[in-house]
Amino acid sequence: MTSLEDSATGEFQSIPYSGQIVITPSTVSVQAMNPDTAASDGPYTINGYEAFYGPATIDDDEDTFSVDVESAAVRDLIGQTLTRSFEVTDDTLVLTPTDPAETWRVSYERVTD
């Protein structure tokens, strides 16, 4: 993860998260952590930690992918389908929510062995 930002106040503000996303042809796995132990949890986090995994489908026409959550740190996410918009430029992946009520965006840089 190279950045996590939120625009709940109208302008994007950086949030000091670290994490990774692993994408295979059929699955997505996400792990992220807020180093601020006093930070409030959100719908995807527990104790500042976000993790979920599941089979994924990509809609190239809409530039979205959906993950059917099979396991998650926040148990209420299990069984839900999380859909994200994506944009890829060179080795950078930017994810944004498809739900307009959510105001975050996250960027990742591709790492290869």
Image (spheres, helix red, strand yellow):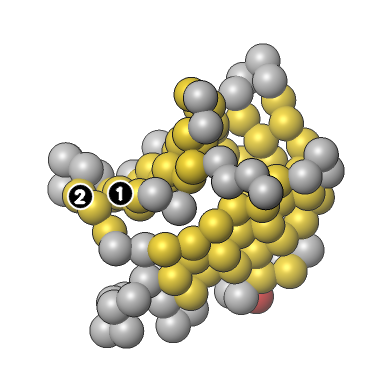
Q: Is residue 10 left or right of residue 48?
A: left
Residue 94 visible somewhere in the drawing:
yes
Q: Does the residue at mark 2 contact the one at mark 1 (Cβ under 8 Å)?
A: yes
Farthest residue, direction top: 61
Q: SS for tag 1?
A: strand
Q: Is residue 35 left or right of residue 13?
A: right
Where 25 falls versus 48 (above or below)? above
- Which residue was labeled with disc 1? 5
Task: Please tell me which residue is depicted at 55% across the width and 57% down the height of the picture.
Answer: 20
Task: Please tell me which residue is depicted at 62% across the width and 20% down the height of the picture.
Answer: 62
Mark closest to the chain's N terminus, 2 or 1: 1
Q: Residues within 10 Å of mark 2 (few under 14, many from 20)?
A: few
Q: Is residue 25 left or right of residue 40?
A: right
Q: How many labels does the image show?
A: 2
Where 94 falls versus 20 (above or below)? above
Q: SS for tag 2?
A: strand
Farthest residue, direction front: 113
Q: Give the amino acid type for the residue marked by disc 2 in the picture.
A: Gln
Q: Is residue 50 left or right of residue 10?
A: right
Task: Please tell me which residue is depicted at 64% across the width and 44% down the height of the picture.
Answer: 112
Residue 31 drawn at (x, y percent)? 57, 64
Residue 82 drawn at (x, y percent)? 63, 48
- Which residue was labeled with disc 2? 13
Image quadrant in which you'd find residue 63: top right
Where 7 falls versus 77 (above or below)? above
Q: Residues within 10 Å of mark 1 (few under 14, many from 20)?
A: some
Residue 60 drawn at (x, y percent)? 68, 20
Task: Please tell me which residue is depicted at 73% across the width and 31% down the height of the picture.
Answer: 58
Q: Give the amino acid type for the residue marked by disc 1 in the picture.
A: Glu
How far is disc 2 from disc 1 in space, using C-alphas?
Answer: 5 Å
Residue 89 drawn at (x, y percent)? 48, 24
